Amino acid sequence: MTSTMRDAVYRMYLDFLETAEHKRHWSIFNDIPWDKLDGSKTTESVGHCVELFCTEELYVPDYSSAGLDLSRSVFGMAWFQTRWAFEESRHGLVFREYLTRSGLRSPAELEALDAGTFSRRWKLPFQTTRQMACYGALQESATYTAYNRQRNLARVADDQVLEAIFFLVGRDEAAHAGFYRAMVQLDLAENRAATIADLAYVLSNFKMPGEGLIPDYTQRLHSSGAGISPRLFLERVVRPLLNTLEISREEIKLALKHAAADAPLSNPAADPWQPVEGHPLPADSSTPVIGRR
Ligand SMILES: [Fe+2]
Ligand SMILES: [Fe+2]
């Protein structure tokens, strides 16, 4: 990474931190109306949904240790990772507090949840900072979309506690998506073709962190209503990202074509716009795909 880019990342992080401290700070203890917890609204289906989000947020030790290891040589990125880890830890904690304070989960059930969670380890899905920036831009935006959907459902149900939680957590996720998006913009300015190739590769291999990690993840996303559909992922996550980055769908398809020509057997899910079994992007499927962070 050039010194100019390192300097740009550092300044980006300072901006991120200043906004986080001045405009986005919130407290689990002071900013959630816990006194408004209403037993008639804390249904078991809500419990399943929040438990799934909670489980995926609880992998912060793995997310942050792997992320720090990858980014440690770039000051702005490494320090972003530390602040990010703090905010993600707050997400897992607020969901956890909701489950216990509402009585939806007992201390023993949460102990079992912790034990199950930490018996498995999350691993980096991609191996370079540029690919992980592409992944972060997609994944954080997908998570914001899922939480924003839950916030709207909570508002309709007049559940003030969950509405506040999903608003505050979702706002963090949107800010994380913004940082990663800005990182990708820097990468594009430095090497447009290579960055588009990476984004295409990440898109065609995208999956949420819980997939393959949390037991029955996809089925639980579906049954709890925690996920978002592939169509929503395409419309609210992929297309807005490509528009902001000023990358056309044709450029992504061309990058995938080149990758397939270079290594025909290494990239089986080549076109993210084509329905592929088990893949998150087929536009007409109603299978939920995401649920976290
Ligand atoms: Fe996040
Ligand atoms: Fe999160």
Image (cartoon, rainbow, N blue to C red):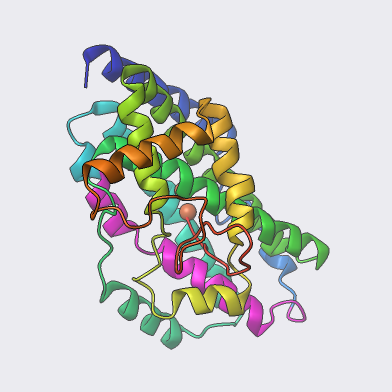
In the rendered image, residue 27 lying in the magenta stretch gets the answer no
Image: 122 above or below 80: below
In the rendered image, residue 60 lying in the magenta stretch gets the answer yes
Q: Is residue 7 left or right of residue 208?
A: left
Image: 34 above or below 104: above
Residue 225: quarter of image: bottom right
The spot of residue 34 in percent (x, y) is 66, 65
Residue at x 29% of width, y 54% of height: 125
- Residue range (magenta): 39-67
Image: 158 above or below 46: above
Q: Nearer the viewer, residue 62 or 232?
A: 232
Residue at x 40% of width, y 54% of height: 206
The spot of residue 236 in percent (x, y) is 63, 46
Q: Is residue 127 left or right of residue 236?
A: left
Q: Residue furthest top?
A: 4
The answer to whether one can see residue 208 in this image is: yes
Image: 140 above or below 220: above
Q: Nearer the viewer, residue 3 or 271?
A: 271
Q: Nearer the viewer, residue 47 or 198?
A: 198
- Dominant secondary structure of the magenta stretch? helix
Quadrant of image for the N terminus: top left
Residue 166: quarter of image: bottom right
The spot of residue 77 in percent (x, y) is 30, 32
Residue at x 44% of width, y 30% of height: 17
The answer to whether one can see residue 83 in this image is: no
Q: Is residue 281 left or right of residue 202?
A: right
Q: Nearer the viewer, residue 150 or 164?
A: 150
The spot of residue 75 in percent (x, y) is 24, 27
Residue at x 23% of width, y 43% of height: 68
Q: Is residue 183 left or right of residue 43?
A: left
